[in-house]
Amino acid sequence: MKIALINENSQAAKNGIIFDALKTVAEPLGHSVYNYGMYGAEDKASLTYVMNGLLAGILLNSKAVDFVVTGCGTGMGAMLASNSVPGVFCGLIVDPTDAFLFGQINDGNAVSLPYAKGFGWAAELNLQDIFRKLFEGERGLGYPKERAEIMAKNRGILRELKAASCKDFLTVLKTVDQDLLKAAVAGEKFQEYFFANAQDEDIKAYIKGLVN
């Protein structure tokens, strides 16, 4: 699985801590991790939590990645922004139990974490435990097990509801504020990672025209 990390400006200074915790857990499990920044508070390309959601949509809908780890101070803004985009199902994760239940019950493709609230001593250990519960073992098995079938059915209904209530993602790219979109894809490593991994040729072509 390809996993993207996206941080916004208020918590950019913690990118290294988060990235190290994510790699420590995910890479031994066979996953690849791509750090889309921000890499530090002084980065020229500054991401807001709204841009995080848009960027998550670009990466997931183009199939450049399979999963997005994002967040902000409380985690709520990045979660709301991510869920406003077609094809993104993002959970707010505070602790390892949240991570386990989100993986087993909701089986979404993105998580948002609070990087200011409660981010204190041994925060990197909590992050590692969260990522371990997210990425080890099979997801979507249900919890408790006897409710697995109805949970899978509800996930399908939710996907159908979102598809019916959202425009297709290419239309979103064309109609969203273009300055916002350009800012979201202006990160130092975006073009290097995105164009090497994106599989949707229409999304890829639109973004290429935007950044050239």
Image: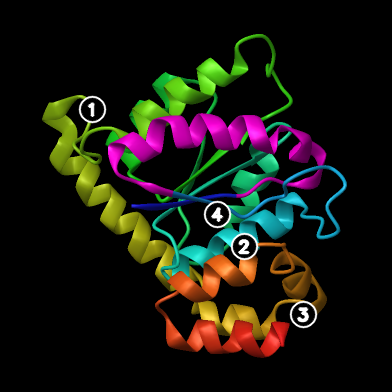
Q: Earlier in the sequence, mark 4 or mark 1?
A: 4
Q: Nearer the viewer, mark 4 or mark 3?
A: 3
Q: Are marks 4 and 3 in contact (CB under 8 Å)?
A: no
Q: In which quarter of the image is residue 15?
A: top right
Q: Residue at x 62, y 82 (%)?
A: 207
Please name the residue that numbered disc 2 is placed on. 55
Q: What is the spatial separation of the Cα atoms under label 4 and label 3, in whole angstroms?
A: 20 Å
Q: What is the spatial separation of the Cα atoms under label 1 and label 2, in whole angstroms?
A: 31 Å
Secondary structure mainly formed by the magenta segment:
helix
The crowd level at tag 3 (other Cα within 10 Å; few <14, some 14-19, many 20+) is few
The reply to whether residue 58 is visible in this rendering is: no
Q: Helix or strand or loop: what does disc 3 sit on?
A: helix
Please name the residue that numbered disc 1 is placed on. 143
* Residue type, label 1: Tyr
Please name the residue that numbered disc 4 is placed on. 83
Q: Which of marks 4 and 3 is nearer the N terminus?
A: 4
Given residues 126 and 179, the one toward you in this image is 126
Q: Helix or strand or loop: what does disc 2 sit on?
A: helix
Q: What is the spatial separation of the Cα atoms under label 1 and label 3, in whole angstroms?
A: 42 Å
* Residue type, label 3: Gln
